[in-house]
Image: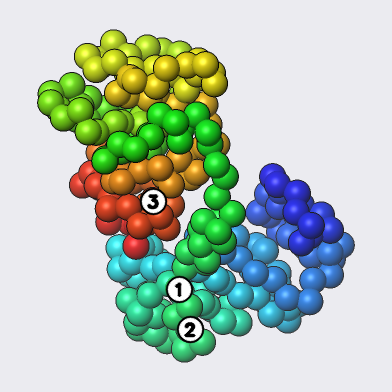
Amino acid sequence: RKNTPLADYVFYLPLDSPSNATRFIDLVKPKFAIFVKYEFWYFYLHTLKQKNIPTFLIAAIFRKEQIFFRWYGRLFKQLLFFFEHLFVQDQNSKDLLESLGIQKVSVAGDTRIDRVYERRLKVRDLPLIRRFAGQTHHVLVAGSTWPNDEQLLIPIINNSGSKQVKYIIVPHEVDEKHLQNIEQQLVKSHQRYTRLTEKSTFDFEVLIVDTIGLLFDIYQYGHIAYIGGGFGSGIHNTLEPAAFGLPIIFGSNYQKFK
């Protein structure tokens, strides 16, 4: 939940049920409704359709493996016909929808790209990170890493003989046990971000970012990015380092990420 000047109220949508959907829509009396990407709430969509309230889906992406396109997915296919218009990320999604007889579809790209571009224009300076990066020829930023990623990366870091490379590791989980595990594996000189001060020396080689909310801004100091998650459930955000023009490395599980 994030308040914004763009909205009078920001709150969680009540659970999807016939009574909740009817009561909520009767209270709000929307002129139209917008759902994003994978948000398919059957009773809300059905009620909006019954009340002739135009409903749109934006930033959607579809794959042929999804239940909408299976022989047993009739109920789920019905959801797609509740929308007045669907704005999808790519031509493949448009083709899949048209194969079901849905014609009100437009390829409009991914709204996250617009958001990341806007954030890029307002990037924050992080003085301690900037001092660590210094004039180094190469800074590798490892973002949202999991243990599977670190098992691959840390031996490479330890075996690197170059003094012209520095490393910033930003773990996905910053609990003490995970941080200690990273430190125990590292042979290279290292330090945690929260222990740095203006008086610190910055001659160590690996910075471990042990807090959240900084990763996007850290990418501005990098020269190459490794994105975690590709050896688990799926890679994390690749758009953020791309916004800074960084080459990106990631694991094998990326198929769901356009």
Tell me residue 179's x, y (percent): 40, 17
Would you say the residues marked 2 and 1 are in contact, meaning their CB atoms lie under 8 Å apart?
no
Tell me residue 99's x, y (percent): 35, 83
N-term-proximal mark, 2 vs 3 = 2
**Nearer the camera: disc 2 or disc 3:** 3
Q: Residue at x 40, y 42 (%)?
A: 221
Q: Pointer 3: residues within 10 angstroms few (<14), some, or many (20+)?
A: many
Residue 132 position by quadrant: top left
Q: Is residue 102 visible?
A: yes
Q: Quadrant of the N terminus?
A: top right
Q: Residue at x 26, y 40 (%)?
A: 138
Q: Residue at x 47, y 89 (%)?
A: 103
Residue 239 position by quadrant: bottom left
Residue that carries the numbered disc 1 in the rendered image: 109
Kind of residue at badge 2: Val
**Nearer the camera: disc 2 or disc 1:** 1
Q: Residue at x 29, y 46 (%)?
A: 224
Q: CA distance from mark 2 to mark 3?
A: 30 Å
Q: CA distance from mark 1 to mark 3?
A: 19 Å
Asked whether, in this view, residue 159 is left or right of residue 75, the answer is left
Q: Is residue 19 visible?
A: no
Q: Quadrant of the C terminus?
A: bottom left
Secondary structure category for the residue under label 3: helix
When the figure is inspected, residue 93 is found, relative to residue 221, above or below; the finding is below
Q: Pointer 1: residues within 10 angstroms few (<14), some, or many (20+)?
A: some
Kind of residue at badge 1: Gly
N-term-proximal mark, 1 vs 3 = 1
Q: CA distance from mark 2 to mark 1?
A: 12 Å
Would you say the residues marked 2 and 3 are in contact, meaning their CB atoms lie under 8 Å apart?
no
When the figure is inspected, residue 185 is found, relative to residue 104, above or below; the finding is above
- Circle on res. 241: 3
Residue that carries the numbered disc 2 in the rendered image: 105
